[in-house]
Amino acid sequence: MSRNGRRAPPGFPLSIERVADASRAAPLLRPQRPVHEAAEHARRAAAPTGLGLDSEAVRARMAERVRAAGIGDERVLAALAAVPRHQFIDSALATQAYEDTSLPIGHGQTISKPSVVARMIELLLDGAAARASGHLGRVLEIGTGCGYQAAVLARLARNVISIERLKPLHDKARENLAPWRSARGLADIRLVYGDGRLGHPPNAPYASIIAAAGGEDLPAAWTEQLAVGGRLVAPLHDAPGRPQRLVVVDRTEAALRHSVHEAVHFVPLRSGLA
């Protein structure tokens, strides 16, 4: 019951005096920002590079997290630390760029987790041709996506041919990779709009082949275009309805040798152009 004899409405246990006291002690609340402050806030929100994402330290911390996940090849870690991942994804997701997570890049596709990119490249570097030369040689990448993995590969290869079947992603990757394709000291990167299941015969054979999509089988074109001594790394369902696993194929003079590694989860491998 309030002081004036009226019953207080339910949900208001404080007395009028206490509410008044609390309001005097509370800071002034503004229901809206002044226009100039709102404009500045919007500008900062639209420009995530101001959050320190261009810092070498940010990329180095990501590489250390990947090391902690089990990647031991210093060449791979250095390549990851050199590529600004946030420049390859939508600005709305930029603050997550250096987490060890996959992120959507549109059209039903994703950018792979840094640790998975690193693991697949580490497996490539352990192939016979790469061990002999100290680099990945000529690389065929199936599934350019946003271009991030191609940029990492370019630091470890002689040249990179990357195929993408989705035209909007092919165009976006071309835009993202423009600064890298002319940078000194990096491999040449050639982007192809085409059906990745067919590989790319004009530049075959390849010392290294890496796929960023997984199917029920390994297309024959890939193994046919793999050089002797070369290595292929791709996600593959080891049986219909079963999870994907990383499969490694080594080509010798006499045969193809397969080995199966970690479970992974990639987008499905599709044929044709879109």
Image (cartoon, rainbow, N blue to C red):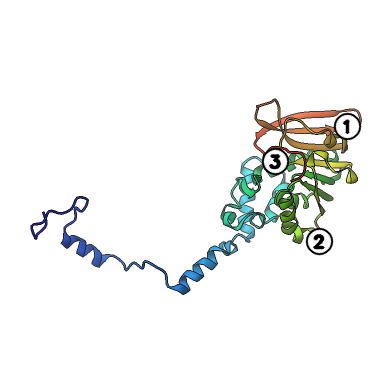
Instruction: Check disc 2 and report the residue beneath it.
Output: 184
Dot 3: what SS? helix
Q: Is residue 62 above or below residue 24?
A: above
Instruction: Check disc 1 and report the residue beneath it.
Output: 252
Q: Is residue 27 above or below residue 215?
A: below
Q: Nearer the viewer, residue 132 or 219?
A: 219
Graded by Cα atoms within 10 Å as few (under 14), some (14 to 19) or many (20 or more), the crowding at tag 1 reads some
User: Given the image, on which type of amino acid does mark 1 rest?
Assistant: Thr
| Residue at the extreme bottom of the image, as rendered | 36
Residue 79 appears in the picture as rendered: no
Q: Nearer the viewer, residue 162 or 170?
A: 170
Q: Is residue 141 above or below residue 86?
A: above
Image disc number at residue 119: 3
First along the sequence among labels 2 and 3: 3
First along the sequence among labels 3 and 1: 3
Tell me residue 72's x, y (percent). 69, 42
Tell me residue 198's x, y (percent). 83, 39
Dot 2: what SS? loop
User: Given the image, on which type of amino acid does mark 2 rest?
Assistant: Arg
Tell me residue 109's x, y (percent). 66, 45
Q: CA distance from mark 2 to mark 3?
A: 26 Å
First along the sequence among labels 1 and 2: 2
Question: Quarter holding the N terminus?
Answer: bottom left
